Image: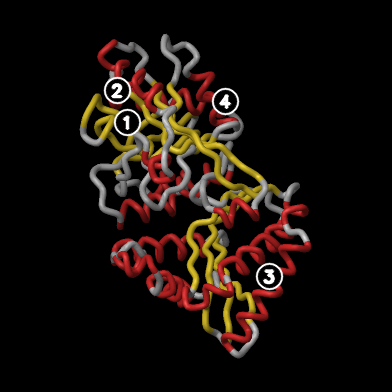
């Protein structure tokens, strides 16, 4: 048995290949914790030391989780080892071997405890609940004197293959047809859907379109920060190289008016980024493209698609019938003391208070 924690981005080529192989047999897919995504983030996003915690057994990688360490609440409280959830990461479910998720997680937890010190708290941010990973976590921590503490949990829209047929009714299709005719009148030509994942120029077109709207005006578009734009380019190029990128565009006479970037992981699709030309907002080009994306999903044969949106996104919530729950989870040390437990127990009460959308995502997982 072998376990280790390696600083990013200084990961060996051999470990990267094992990491990619683990993604193909993960108990729960997570595009945001795949090697291509995490390594691009480590190269281009400003951060202090970030590490990859892994568990290897019989020469096979069984678990992988990017982590970092800081204080519990914005520089205060006890030290915490956290899963690395940054501004572009929308899911923090660890990558575990599907054949032995419990053993993989137990090995990972042992390594994290050994690396960080037994009095450190472990924090899993944006953990997908209701699946084999949460079940493994509950079993692995069942011997603790103090159960893991669930911080604020929330639901966001998901599209399941068996529900998709009822998601797009006649009313939605009529609305899309009406909006399509309006856009054609505005631009003087019909709109068409184009799949551009194989075109490097499409990545820069996306960045330009996003920056043309309110995100560019506020300085929050990816193109507003050169390092963030390069991160996006690297992620798209790496996922396209392995056939796991969807970059769809609603275009009129070759001009994009809406575009959407999805990442494929296992049997799931993760919506990463979208943008639209705000000058044609009255024709809702983003809505038109979203409906087309749903129609594509219906025939692609994958089991589910995660919207990765704000839980209060009214357009997505109206279109997508399914929901999945995510939660922030604190795991106390194996030998808990009152000093360590005091802030955790306080969190149990505090986390029940109402939260805005941004607070839900940032509760105790300070963006890194």
- The crowding category of the residue bearing disc 1, from other C-alpha atoms within 10 Å (few below 14, some 14 to 19, many at least 20), is many
Earlier sequence position, callout 2 versus callout 3: 2
Q: Is residue 205 left or right of residue 362?
A: right
Pick the residue in front: 248 or 77. 77
Q: Is the residue marked by circle 4 packed among few (<14), some (14-19), or many (20+) residues within 10 Å? A: few
Q: CA–CA distance between discs 1 and 4?
A: 21 Å
Residue indicated by mark 4: 135
Element on which disc 3 rests: helix
Q: Earlier in the sequence, mark 1 or mark 2?
A: 1
Q: Nearer the viewer, residue 97 or 38?
A: 38
Secondary structure of the residue carrying tag 4 is helix
User: Label 2: few (<14), some or many (≥20) within 10 Å?
Assistant: many
Disc marking residue 120 = 2
Left or right: 64 in relation to 252: left
Depicted 348 relative to depicted 172: above or below: above
Circles 2 and 3: CB atoms closer than 8 Å: no
Give the answer, above or below, for where 199 lies relative to 121: below
Which residue has dot 3 on it?
176
Work out which residue is located at the far bottom of the displayed protein and give it: 188
- Work out whether 159 lies above or below 328: below
Residue name at image x 56 percent, y 73 percent: 249
198 sits to left or right of 168 = left
């Amino acid at each position: 048995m072998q376990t280790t924690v390696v600083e990013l981005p200084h990961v060996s080529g051999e470990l990267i290949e094992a990491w990619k192989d683990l993604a193909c047999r993960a108990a729960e897919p997570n595009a945001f914790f795949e090697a291509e995504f995490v390594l691009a983030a480590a190269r281009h996003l400003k951060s202090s030391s970030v590490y990859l915690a892994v568990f290897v057994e019989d020469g096979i990688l069984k678990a992988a989780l990017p982590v970092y360490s800081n204080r519990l609440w914005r520089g205060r409280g006890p030290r915490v080892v956290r899963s690395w959830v940054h501004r572009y990461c929308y899911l923090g479910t660890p990558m575990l071997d599907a054949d032995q998720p419990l053993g993989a997680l137990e090995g990972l937890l042992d390594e994290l405890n050994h690396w960080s010190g037994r009095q450190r708290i472990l924090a899993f941010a944006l953990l997908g609940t209701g699946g084999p990973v949460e079940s493994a976590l509950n079993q692995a921590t069942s011997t603790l004197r103090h159960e893991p503490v669930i911080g604020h949990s929330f639901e966001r829209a998901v599209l399941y293959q068996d529900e998709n047929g009822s998601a797009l009714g006649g009313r939605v299709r009529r609305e899309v047809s009406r909006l399509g005719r309006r856009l054609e009148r505005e631009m003087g030509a019909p709109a068409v859907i184009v799949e551009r994942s194989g075109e490097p120029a499409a990545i820069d077109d996306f960045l330009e379109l996003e920056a043309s709207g309110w995100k560019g005006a506020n300085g929050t578009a990816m193109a507003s920060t050169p390092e963030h734009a390069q991160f996006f380019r690297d992620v798209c190029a790496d996922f396209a190289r392995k056939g796991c990128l969807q970059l769809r565009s609603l275009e009129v006479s070759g001009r994009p008016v809406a575009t959407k970037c999805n990442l494929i992981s296992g049997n799931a699709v993760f919506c990463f980024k979208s943008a639209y030309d705000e000058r044609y907002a009255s024709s809702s080009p983003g809505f038109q493209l979203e409906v087309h994306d749903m129609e594509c999903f219906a025939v692609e044969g994958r089991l589910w698609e995660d919207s990765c949106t704000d839980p209060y996104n009214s357009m997505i919530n109206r279109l997508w019938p399914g929901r999945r729950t995510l939660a922030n989870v604190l795991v106390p040390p194996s030998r808990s003391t009152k000093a360590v437990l005091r802030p955790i127990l306080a969190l149990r009460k505090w986390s029940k208070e109402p939260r805005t959308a941004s607070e839900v995502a940032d509760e105790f997982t300070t963006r890194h």
